Image (cartoon, rainbow, N blue to C red):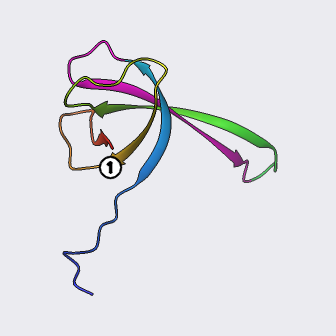
Amino acid sequence: MDKTTETHKKRLKGVVVSDKADKTVTVKVRRFTKHPKYGKFMTIDKKYKVHDENNAHKVGDEVVIESCKPVSKDKSFKVV
C-alpha cells in the first residue's frame, strides 16, 4: 500500500461548549480511563478549538472532529 493513500486522522466525539469566535467552536471531549498506578477509573475532559467553516454548530451540539493540518496557532482539528 502506498503511504500517500493511507490516512491516519484522529477522530473524536464531543460536545460544543462555545461558539463565540468566528469560524471556531470549542469542543469538550470526555474520556474514561484507568489511572496507571492506582487503578482508579476517572473521567478526563479536554477542550479543543475546532475549525467550523460555516459557523453551523451551536452550543450543546454533539459533533465528531477530525485532525487536520494546523489552521491557526491553536486549531488543528475540523468538524466532520
* Image coords of residue 29 (percent x, y): 52, 36
Question: Looking at this view, is 49 or 38 the one in front?
Answer: 49
Residue 3 lies in the magenta stretch: no
Residue drawn at x 49%, y 42% as measured from the top left: 13
Mark 1 residue type: Ser
The part of the image, by quadrant, that contains residue 77 is top left
Residue nearest the viewer, comparing 13 with 72:
13
| Vertical side of 42 occupied by 25: above or below | above
- Determine the secondary structure under disc 1: strand
| Point 34% across, 17% down: residue | 19
Residue 26 belongs to magenta span: yes
Which residue is denoted by mark 1 in the rendering?
67
> Position of 69 compared to 12: left or right?
left
47 lies left or right of 78: right
Q: Which residues are magenta?
A: 19-36
Q: Main secondary structure of the magenta part?
A: strand
Q: Nearer the viewer, residue 41 or 51?
A: 51
Q: Quadrant of the C terminus?
A: top left
